[in-house]
Amino acid sequence: MILALMVAVGRAADLRTLFISMPDSILPTLTKSDRMDFLDYMDSGMKAKVRNKLGGESVMTLFEENMLSIQTSQSGRLDIMLLNKGKDENLICIIRTATAKYDDSRLSFYTENWEPVPTADLIKLPVLDDYLTKEALKSDSLSLFKKKSMLRLQAITPLNGALEFRYTSLDDLGQDADKYRDWIKPTPLRYTWNGKTFKRK
């Protein structure tokens, strides 16, 4: 009701309101009551931890005006970032990251009413070649490397109005990873939000 009223009068909803109204299907291990408890704990300066539906502990590690992070389990993290699309509208960016052996992130977007927005409409995701150095692209062994390390895993870090992508598939090669370490660019790929889409810097 609160969210609907704010949208109706032409005001962008804030992160607190959107987080509370978030459908349980997006974060099924936590209830609406859990999400409200997170915010109460953060407001009180206490450690924001709750018992999730799986019997484990989930911890909110960050809550700012346009960004929050939750360690959903020992091997999972959820990041939510608000992106401004104009005076009266925000876009919701959600990053789900499996943090078990190697970080593996998945990106999704929603309107303020929690309607899905196609990712392809907002960002052209990195491909393997984007991570490779000039040395790698010129190597006669590149085709062999691509067969060994296809782009399966990448980690996404939310920043203020930007996303950073890191290539994590390399470590999945085990001992062979060190042979190709110099082939991967050392700095993350940064994409900045321009109000409509993400563009690579």
Image (cartoon, rainbow, N blue to C red):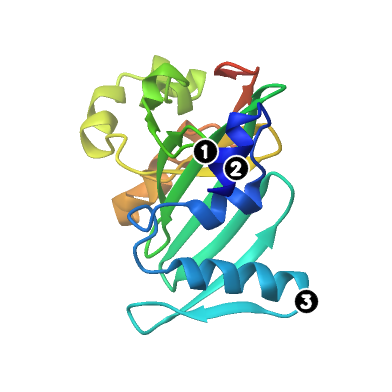
Q: CA distance from mark 2 to mark 1?
A: 5 Å
Res 142 quadrant in image: top left
Q: Which residue is mark 3?
A: 44
Disc 1 marks a residue whose amino acid type is: Cys
Residue drawn at 67 percent across, 44 percent down: 14
Residue drawn at 59 percent across, 48 percent down: 2
Res 41 quadrant in image: bottom right
Q: Can residue 180 be seen? A: yes
Disc 3 marks a residue whose amino acid type is: Ser
Q: Is residue 120 left or right of residue 94?
A: left
Q: Is residue 125 left or right of residue 172?
A: right
Q: Which residue is mark 2?
A: 81
Q: Is residue 143 above or below residue 65?
A: above
Q: Is residue 196 above or below residue 160?
A: above
Tag 2 near tag 1, CB within 8 Å = yes
Residue drawn at 54 percent across, 57 percent down: 20
Mark 1 falls on what kind of element? Answer: strand
